[in-house]
Amino acid sequence: MFRKVQNSDKETVIAMAKSYYLEDGNSYGETRIEKAIASILAGEPLAKLWIIEQERTVIGYLCVSLGFSLETGGRDFFIDELFVKKTYRNQGIGTKALEFACAESKKLGAERIVLEVEQSNPGAKALYKRFGFESHPRYLMSKFL
């Protein structure tokens, strides 16, 4: 069901990312996505990208970025993106992807795994809460450099 991204997957992932970002109302930066995928394919050590397949059909992707946190006491990984095509949702695939992300992160020495979710996505929030993720009274802030 999960396999590492390959060069032949690049355009497929870009198309799914575009769909994902438009669905969430986020700005779509194709150049940034292309650069990130190229970096992962070239061996970027701080990110893992997997294709989600069902019966040899690509149905989504999962990206985990690897980090470190004093607060956590060590490796602190981030589920950067989890996308499942609409026609494959509500079939347990998201749960399997979270299980996979947590298992792979644990193998790589993670102490904690973190994710972000759109406030306007109650389905995803419910899934993450059922899986044991907790909300924090902090705001995620970012800045492009």
Image (tube, grey):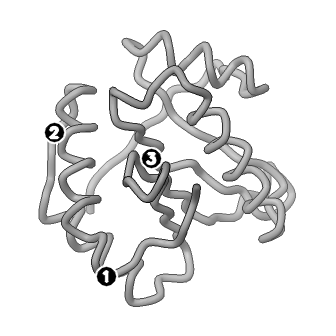
Q: Callout 2: helix, strand or loop?
A: loop
Amino acid type of the residue tagged 3 in the rendering: Glu
Look at 13% across and 65% down and name the residue there: 31
In front of the other: label 2 or label 1? 1
Q: Callout 3: helix, strand or loop?
A: strand
Look at 31% across and 82% down and name the residue there: 7
Q: Answer yes or no: do the residues labelled 2 and 3 have beta carbons within 8 Å?
A: no
Residue 73 lies, in percent from the top left, at: 86, 57
Look at 78% across and 71% down and name the residue there: 108
Asked if residue 12 lies left or right of residue 79, the reply is left
In the rendered image, the vertical position of residue 95 relative to residue 74, given as above or below: above
Task: Tell me which numbered mark, 2 or 3, is placed earlier along the sequence.
Answer: 2
* Quadrant in the picture for the C terminus: bottom left
Question: Which residue matches tag 3?
Answer: 81
Asked if residue 60 lies left or right of residue 36, the reply is right
* Quadrant in the picture for the N terminus: bottom right
Indicate which disc residue 27 carries.
2
Within 10 Å of disc 3 (Cα), the crowding (few <14, some 14-19, many 20+) is some
Seen from the viewer's position, the closer of residues 100 and 28 is: 100
Indicate which disc residue 7 carries.
1
Residue 43 lies, in percent from the top left, at: 47, 88
In front of the other: label 3 or label 1? 1
Indicate which disc residue 88 carries.
none
Amino acid type of the residue tagged 1 in the rendering: Asn
Residue 67 lies, in percent from the top left, at: 64, 64
Look at 55% across and 62% down and name the residue there: 65
Amino acid type of the residue tagged 2 in the rendering: Ser
Q: CA distance from mark 2 to mark 3?
A: 15 Å
In front of the other: label 2 or label 3? 3
Q: CA distance from mark 2 to mark 1?
A: 25 Å
Within 10 Å of disc 1 (Cα), the crowding (few <14, some 14-19, many 20+) is few
Within 10 Å of disc 2 (Cα), the crowding (few <14, some 14-19, many 20+) is few
